[in-house]
Amino acid sequence: MSENHFWETQLLGLPIHANTLIMVGAAMGVLLLGATWLTASMKLVPSRRQMIAESIYGVCRGITYATAEARGDKFLHYIGSLFLFILTCNLMGQLPLRLIQLPQGELMAATGDFNVPAALALCTLVMYFSFGIKQKGLSYFSHYLSPLPMMIKGQPLVGQIAFITFFWPFIFLNILEDFTRPGSLMIRLFFNILVGEILSGIAMTVAPLGLPIVVILLELLVAFIQAYVFAILSSVYISLMSENHDDHDEDHGHSASSHHEATLALANQTASV
């Protein structure tokens, strides 16, 4: 994306994109006001507003339950906030805010700025390290040695030494895997929103009376899909990293593993849409 889309200025001596900060602040404001309004008067017999709030909660909990079942309630607060924030940012990008004149750039979807998906991916990285260490302690880092314990089991001493000596590339790859997961989230979200921004600009130029409506309808669908994919993949990663197999019997562990693999496959298929 060309730099004229951004209003570049400085804050505390650091370069920033002011239009992105405005859109991020607006999205946070919408979420805070919406949450306050929807939950203003919670009752045993729900009102329409409360039913909407409970439905939103149900959607968010459905994401974590699909990947970690009841254990997902431990990180529901993060996944729900992540999903709603990304969705709000994506949807706000479809409003005619480009008509508002800025000193530079334009008011576009905050997720169309590479810095926002990068920050969100970093948050997911921190969260799944935090939950993994909280659940497993320092033994969390033992997964970097996989599958070395299985390889040296039953081997003579010479074989064990040989495996340990030449295993270091696998440790590097296991560490790299932890950091490429959030990287894939970041790239997927950014480029899907970026393409939408480009298509919207082309549509306004080529056929301003009709084509932009088609593009907007398509981007509304993409807005929901990308928010859902980012949230469910984050939930899968946190679930896998924080799962303690010692708390389950062997059959349940195999079942849980299959469940996570199926969910991850479904999420990746959704992301390819």
Image: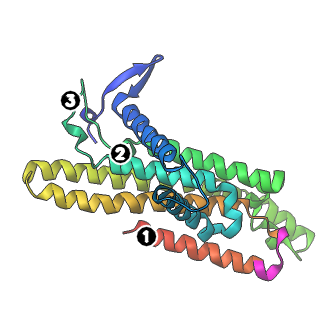
At mark 2, the secondary structure is helix
Which residue shows up at 31% across the image and 49% down it? Answer: 194
Which contiguous range is marked in magenta? 246-252
Q: Is residue 41 above or below residue 164?
A: above
Indicate the amino acid at tag 3. Answer: Gln
Residue 56 position within the rendered picture, expressed as x and y whole percent measured from the top left: 50, 59
Badge 3: residue crowd in 10 Å (few <14, some 14–19, many ≥20): few
Magenta stretch secondary structure, dominant = helix
Q: Earlier in the sequence, mark 2 or mark 3?
A: 3
82 w.r.t. 252: above or below = above
Distance, label 1 to label 3, CA atoms, is 36 Å
Q: Please identify the residue farthest to the right as the structure is shown.
A: 157
| Residue 169 in view | no
Quadrant location of the N terminus in the rendered image = top left
**What type is the residue that disc 2 sits on?**
Gly
Q: Is residue 250 magenta?
A: yes
| Residue at 25% in and 32% down | 105
Which type of secondary structure does the marked residue at label 1 adopt?
A: helix
Quarter containing the C terminus: bottom left
Give the residue number, with chain letter if any, for mark 3: 101
Q: Which residue in the structure is indicated by mark 2?
A: 112
Percent x, y of residue 77: 62, 52
Query: Residue 99's spot in the image, x, y percent?
Result: 19, 37
Count of number-bearing discs:
3
Upstream in the sequence, badge 1 or badge 3? Answer: 3
Report the Cα–Cα distance between label 2 and label 3. 19 Å
Q: Which residue is mark 1?
A: 270
Q: Is residue 5 visible?
A: yes
Which circle, 2 or 3, is nearer the viewer? 3
**Mark 1 Cα-neighbour bin, 10 Å: few <14, some 14–19, many ≥20:** few
